[in-house]
Amino acid sequence: MKRHTTLLVLLLFAVAASSCSSNLGLGEADCSPPSGDVSSSNIMTVQAVPTAKYTPCLNELRLGWDSVEWFAERGRSGIKITDDFEPFLTATVTETCDVSEAVAGDSGFPDIQRFEDIESQPARIEIVIVPSGKQPLAAARLLVEELDGAQIDDRPVAYTVDGAINDPVSSRSELALSRGAYVWIIDELDVEEGTVQLRSNIAATAGRNLEPDDALDRIEDTAPGVFYRGSWFFTFEGGCITYEFDANGILAETVAADADDALGFYPAGELRQGARDAGFDIG
């Protein structure tokens, strides 16, 4: 006798299943081709958004990912990835999504369009040293050699010496600040005293007559935390997969690359056919 499974019954099961972590290899949101019996999660996935050409899947777990939770309800289904029980990355398939505020990118797939709406603070701290003349330029280069490898709160620091000494210090400083960098101005007096003038988009950080170590301490005290927040959207025939990010600290440093590598798109048609071949009436 043919088995008939309704979405309502499956969704009642999903309420209980959604609080449990999914393990790769059991067919729960796994990007590997299904083998043997079709899992209940796969059936609910394709029933939740019956128009979607793809559904999100997971290639592998990454270091720092505590658990992977699968969820489904009418109109949406997906994968929630948590750290210390807090979600920082969720991949959800829906029929449509709003990309009006997002920027177009390259999905790597001919039939999928990619859009991004992201705010981030990278781990690396940029310091641009702006010397006012030849002598300060030589001092700036020597200072970079002395500070090579120094970190701020375990965050890497990149030093750049602006050698355009014929241009005004003010315009060079403003350009560096507009790029989100910290600025150390060095003039002839700073060369004599071994100091720098610190400029920043954060008013509390700025200061004059600072020794380089003191300038680094000021940056450490006021530097914004590392984060990666916002959404990626992947649109395709009959649906959209949205990656929602809310990662901080160490996770934020690699979450974008990890999402690209670890998450994938499973052809929903294959899951539907597998469910039918297993005897399920998925509508």
Image (cartoon, grey):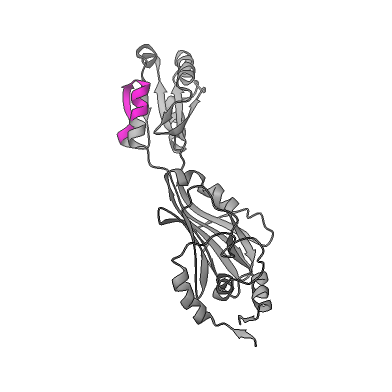
Q: Is residue 177 above or below residue 97?
A: above
Camera-side residue of 20 and 140: 20
List the single residue furthest toward the bottom: 1
Q: Is residue 230 above or below residue 210?
A: below
Judging depth in this view, the residue of 266 and 38 nearest the camera is 38
**Residue farthest to the left?**
204
Q: Position of residue 250 (x, y in %)?
A: 45, 43
In the picture, measured across the screen, residue 154 lies left or right of residue 222, that is right
Q: Position of residue 240 (x, y in %)?
A: 57, 66
Q: In this view, does 4 lie above or below 169?
A: below
Where residue 211 appears, as percent x and y from the top left, is 34, 20
The N terminus lies in quadrant: bottom right
In the depicted view, which residue is nearer to us: 112 or 84? 84
Q: Which residue is drawn at 41% across and 26% down?
A: 184
Instruction: Please tell me in which quadrant of the rendered image residue 221 appears.
Output: top left
212 falls in the magenta region = yes
Q: Which of 136 and 172 is in front in this view?
A: 136
Q: Which residue occupies 61% across, 84% down?
A: 3
Residue 131 spot, x, y in % from top left: 45, 20
Is residue 213 found inside the magenta-colored segment of the image? yes
Residue at point 40%, 56% (across, down) = 86
Image quadrant of residue 94?
Answer: bottom right
The span picked out in magenta is 204-217
The number of numbered badges drawn on the structure is 0
- Image check: 84 left or right of 117? left
On the rendered image, what quadrant is the C terminus found in?
A: bottom right
